[in-house]
Each structure stands twice: as C-alpha cells, then as structure tokens.
Image: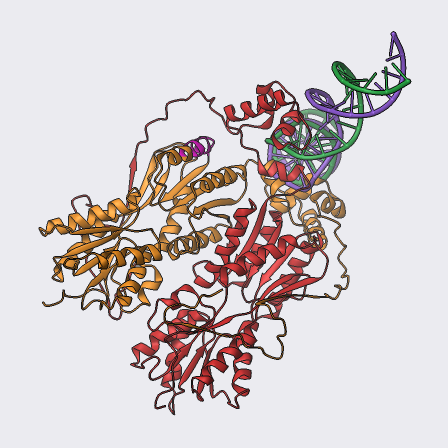
Chain colours: A orange, B red, C green, D purple
Amino acid sequence: MTAPAHGQEVVPKFRGPATTAPLGVELSERETPVHPDTRRRAPAAHVTLDAVAREAGVSLATASRALNGTTRVRDDLRGRVRAAADLLGYIPNAHAQALASAEGNRTVGLICHDVGDPYFAGIASGVMRAAAEQDLLVMLASTFREPAREIAYVSMLRAQRARAILLIGSGFQDRAWERAMDAELEPYVRAGGRVAVVSRHRSMRVDTVQPENRAGAAALAASLVKLGHRDFAVLSGPPELTTVADRLAGFREGLAAAGITLRRVVRGAFTREGGHAAACQLLAGGGARPTCVFAVTDVMAVGALAALREAGVRVPEDMSLAGFDDIPVVREVSPPLTTVALPLTEMGEQVIALALRRPSGAGRSRVLRIEGDVVLRGSTGAPPGS
Amino acid sequence: MTAPAHGQEVVPKFRGPATTAPLGVELSERETPVHPDTRRRAPAAHVTLDAVAREAGVSLATASRALNGTTRVRDDLRGRVRAAADLLGYIPNAHAQALASAEGNRTVGLICHDVGDPYFAGIASGVMRAAAEQDLLVMLASTFREPAREIAYVSMLRAQRARAILLIGSGFQDRAWERAMDAELEPYVRAGGRVAVVSRHRSMRVDTVQPENRAGAAALAASLVKLGHRDFAVLSGPPELTTVADRLAGFREGLAAAGITLRRVVRGAFTREGGHAAACQLLAGGGARPTCVFAVTDVMAVGALAALREAGVRVPEDMSLAGFDDIPVVREVSPPLTTVALPLTEMGEQVIALALRRPSGAGRSRVLRIEGDVVLRGSTGAPPGS
DNA sequence: GCGCTTTCAGAAAGCGCTTTCTGGTAAGGT
DNA sequence: ACCTTACCAGAAAGCGCTTTCTGAAAGCGC
C-alpha cells in the first residue's frame, strides 16, 4: 500500500491480540439480530402513493396534493394523508415525480478531473455547499483526465435530466474532443439545460467562471520583480490549455512591464509529479540558475518545492518559488508558498449559481471574472547576493 | 478573500490594461454567434423513443429492443433504429427507464462530511474510480457535519432509488441521530437497498470497511516507544466517535505493552484548527512537556505541527509528532509526518464493491478490516537528551 | 327557494419508457 | 399440402407520480 521511499520507513505490522489474519485485509461476517417488527407494516418493495391514499381513505390525487401542497386540501384530509405516509414510511419515487411533472428533477451534474485533487476538491466543496442550500443533489463525475469519459458523462447526465451541468477545469488538447463535447452540449442547452464552466473556454451559450489568470500572473510577476528578481523560470503545464497559456502570457507581461525577459520555460504534467519532474529538469540543465521560479499551479509548485529540497536548493535563500491557486496545502509546507490566491469554494458556489440563474437554454453567456490576490509567503524573498 | 495573516502579505491588486473594474469580481456578457442549423432537426424539448420509432418506421417496442438489445431484432431494423436515434440525437430518459424497468437506476449515493477534506476526498476519489468502471453515477452529498442534513440526504437518496448508499466517516455523538439514521436506513435495506459504510459503526445489516484503528495506533505506539519515548500526549477528537475511541485505546494498549502510561489527552475538533488549538492547549499547560505527541488524525496533526512551529518547538528534536491516515499533505510538510497509512482510495473502491456485491437487502453483514501501516518519517525521532 | 359562484375531492390522462402478450409469417417435419 | 415450431414485430399494460378536468357539495345574494 505504501512503498518505502525517501526518508520514510514502513514498520512491520503490529499483531495485537485482536488480529490474527495474515493478510493486510480481513473479511469477516457477523450475524445481525433480526430487527423486532415494529408497529410499522413491512413494506414488500416500496410504498407507493397509492398505498398511502388507500390507507388514508382518499384518492390518489388528493394524497398527492396533500403532500405537495400545490392546491388547497381540507385540513383533516391532509392530516390523514400525512399520518398515513408516516405510518407506512412513504418515500416518493423521484423518477416518477420527475417524469410526471414539468419541474424535472432536483439534481445537477458536476464533472471534474479528480475530486482527489485539492483544486477540484475545493471547488466541489463550494458547489456542494450551494447545492445543499437549495436541496439539490449533485451527481459527481470524475473523468480522470480521459476525454472519452468526459463526453460519456455528459451523455449520462443528459439522460438523468440534470438541471445543470457544471464542467470544472481545462479542456483537452485535442480539438476533436472539444468539438464532440460541443456537439453533446449543444442539444442539451437547446432543450433548456444549463451549462456553466470554471476556467474553460467554450464556444457555446455557456456561463463561465473565469479566474483572471493573466492579470494574476502579471501581478505576481510584478511582485517578484519588486523583490529584486531579474532572472526567472516558469514551470508550465500542457501548452494547449488556456489556463496555462494565460498564466504564462500574464507572467511574461508582468516581467515585460519591468523590461525583463523570461529566460526559461519547462513543461510538465499538471500534477505534483509533473512539477517535481519539471523542477528536476530545470536544475539539471546547465548554466546559471534562475533566482525565481513560477509554477503555473500550486500542485506543481508543491512538487517543485520537494524537488528543490531534494537537490539541496534552499528556498527562498537560493531560489524563490511561487505558485498559483492557493490550495490549502501551500500554507502547510515550509516555507509556505507565495501564490496567487483564488477563492476556490466561492468559485464553486458561483458556478452553480450562474448555471441555475441562467434563463433556460438560450440567452447571452455570462462571464464572471475572478481576480486572484497575490499572497507573498515565505517561499519568496530577495534574490541571493542582494 | 484572503486575510493577511502570520508571515504572509497580500499585495494590492495589479491593474493590467485588460482590467478596469474596481471589484474583485466582474460580470460581463458576450453574444454567442447563433449556431448555424445543421442537418439535424431542432428538438423542441426532448427527443423521445417514440419519435425515433416513427422516424425509423418501426414500433415503439421494436425501437426499445433495438437500442437495448435484450431480445433479437432483425439487423436491418436495428440499423434503421440506430440511425434514426443518431439523426435525432436521442438520449433516453433515465427516469422513464428506471420507472419502467425493474433494474432501477444506475446511481449510488455517497454521503460524507466534506469533500474538501483530504481524507474524504481520497476515499471519494476511490469510489469515483470504481463507479466509473461500472458506468455508475455517484450522487454526492456533503453534510458539513450536520446530522439533520445527513438524514435528509439519506431520504433524498432513497427517493432517487439509488442502488446503494455509502456512508463515509464517523457518525454523530448524539444517539438520537444515530437512531433516526437507523430508522431511515432500515426500510431502505429491507426494500433491497444496499448500504455500506467506512469507519462507522451501525447496528444494522450493513457492510463495513473498517480500518484497524486500535491495532494501527498500538503499532504506532510500539514504534514510538522503540525510538526511546516514554512521555506521551495524545491530541484527540470528539470522544464519542468510535474512530477516536479506538485509536486512543489502541495507543494506550501499545504503550501499556511497554509498561508506559499515557500522561495527557487533549481534545479538539476533528479539523486542522482543532489540532492547532489542542496543541496550543498542550503547550500552554505548565509542567514537563511530553517528548512525543500523537494526533488521532493527520488533519489534526498538520494543525498541531503548525502550532508547534509557531511556539518555537522543534520537531522532532524537541518533540516528536505522529498522525493517522496518511493523507497526501503529510508528505509535503517539513518534517514529513510519521503516521499510520490507510489506503484511502482503495478503501473507497472497497466500500462501493462491498455494497454492490451485497446480496440484495438481507443477509449477513460483512466487515472488511483494513490494516494500517506505520510509516516513520521525519517528524519522529529520538526524544531530546538521549 | 333558485341559480350563481366557489371550494375541493376524485377520475383519468398522460410523462417516456420496458416488457409481457399476441399474432403473423416463414421455416421445417411428415 | 398441412400442421407444428420458431422467430420476431406490434399492441398494450403498466411503472408511480402530477395535473387537468369534471362534478358534487356548499355558500351566497336575490
């Protein structure tokens, strides 16, 4: 489960008196005492509204109205229906409700690469909070960065008649996939579905929560220049992602404003390991090292920090390091990372709000621009020898 | 969005040429070019199977069979139906399908406290991966630690006729809530629903993925004793949670095996801040400080580490610190934290597997015990002055 | 007391599918 | 040539609900 690695050691397993199995995992069974039958009748499969109506001695229609309160129902009847529903343990069938009513169902779909990634987890957390307030259920889909799966999920969410589909994070390099995605989304929107995205360009009638990647990166560059740096490198991600392109361009812009040219860009995957590898590559390259490195995401920056430490490069004394996003972990590492802070949970709340407020289907698309705050922390300082 | 805090500084926002709005957030609209009408007919609302059948010149029944392939359909007809479905952009209505078929719908419910917490995010990630492989959609519900919301979610998931309900993480202190939860779950299980939980005791016919908290904590204690420590403190969580109780008891057991008595237990919330506060409280108390501290979760340990650093306590020279869970962040802090590693994503995969494999409704309940590995990292060392 | 409106319960028509059940046609046996 | 199987398309009956429509009963003014 855990491979022994640099600076850590896995201790052989403790065998307490309670544990006898030789495996790391043990499956046991236990008999559950049969629940003593309460007063409640045993529902064979599912209690239907029909059963409730019969129990209450009213018609199906009345039972429905009594429980959902759309039209007036005499108080005594309503009481009887409620009591019957309670007694029988009635739970409405959401499918039948969605089918019968024009309302549709109270769910939204959320598609992201991986909830295990703190960036997505932060946004998802915001979506969840907002959804909870509106009694919406969120259908979560993790693509694990496979475009085919992403499209399949949109299709599934369409089948589920989700009120809205939320797409979080960069799209894929391959234009063909993006086109396929548009083809999938277009009829959905036409049919009244709402789509909103975070940090992803779309060609459609889709609302967007868009971090100001350029401005943020430019501001960061300006701050780093102010610390005295002249010599920069960027640890970048897949070049086709707009997020990457914008942050890189913004950083260049910020440097240019001070008459500085970016010396070096190293590309890596959008993961901790990608950042680690990119940093290693940067250090391996001969020549003078930059005094300051900007990783286009915090996740990469965390990997880079580890790489620098392993290589004996002191941060920030030998080299300053900055990231982007402000995921929680960057406050915990030492030194804590300078970054451009994005309000992740708030972005999650906004994207769902944007989608749900959208006038069904057509209409202009809105862009909610989110500014990032440059937060200087311990990972950046004056360049060495200044 | 980000309050200036200890050791960090928020830089005033950069105003690039592109940004003119004075707010941190800006809402703009843009007109989308109207999508040129393709060959495809414009679906007014939703394409129904009926429309597909008509287009293909076959009956509704045949269309259904052609698309789902349960019974044999002549190849040419099947082809015509498929073509018609493609042409019209048919997406089946999952609600109607669920309602009409005995199969039910392809969704499972996942209830946890907060996907923003790396512990839950890790498990959720595992659930997502397993679900993706079986073409299941996951309905995610975050309770934000409110028992009422948790019960409401179970009810909603019941209404959605989720194939399975997965409950992740400790239950609540209040026995009344747990009883209410049982009352909610019991008819669900009776009606054929599957329930599986991670790290949570239930009185019902429910499968469980249960980390070996006692054995793990005991093993950790043994390892720490072996490093030379005699003087321990525990940063604990809410005492009524079985997870907490087990880890604490296990740790005591491990110490007892070496003839050592635990000196001090400080309670805190199950969060980073809880760990921070508990550590502060521990340091504030006068008297000799323990040489080694065990925080019952990594999340708390991370908070504790920050508190120790702020108080000028060096880890591990002045004090050793260990956690439990092995969430990713503990490898990134310095020193990296010694902990008991739980295979979080694997636990997620197991809990959903357990639920889905469960013979519908009744039957024995199974317990999958997960052993933790003690992983010694830089946060633990020999006690000072040895 | 009569016709009027108003109130509210019940009957019934779907929502979009799956799945029997029915029946027509072609193939095979005698 | 006739009858039995076998195969497969279509009709129709729901799945569990919402919602319109219908109509009975009650309240009201005259």
Residue at position x 33%, y 57% from top?
A299
Residue at 24%, 51% in the rendered image: A266
Q: Is residue B9 left or right of residue B244?
A: left
Residue A113 location, x and y as percent?
A: 42, 49
Quarter of the image where one finds residue B366: bottom right
State the quadrant of the C terminus of chain A.
Answer: bottom left
Total residue callouts: 0
Give how far across and how far down residue A96 sits, in percent. Answer: 63, 40
* Dominant secondary structure of the residues highlighted in magenta in the image: helix
Q: Residue at x 50, y 37 (%)?
A: A155
Is A130 located above or below residue D19 in the figure? below
Decide which of B136, A318 is in the foreground and name it: A318
Q: Does D12 sit above or below residue B7? A: above
Q: In x, y percent, where is residue A131? A: 47, 50
**Quadrant position of residue B386:** bottom left
Q: Residue at x 59, y 61 (%)?
A: B197
- The image position of residue A119, as x and y in percent, is 37, 55
Residue B39 against residue B354 in the figure, above or below:
above
Residue B188 counted in the magenta span: no
Relative depth, front residue between A220 and A298:
A298
Q: Quadrant of residue A57?
A: top right
Q: Which residues are magenta?
A: A182-192
Residue B18 visible in the shown view: yes
Q: Nearer the viewer, residue A201 or A59?
A: A201
Image-based side of B42 in relation to B68, left or right: left
Residue A324 seen in the figure: no
Q: Is B305 located above or below residue A195 in the figure?
A: below
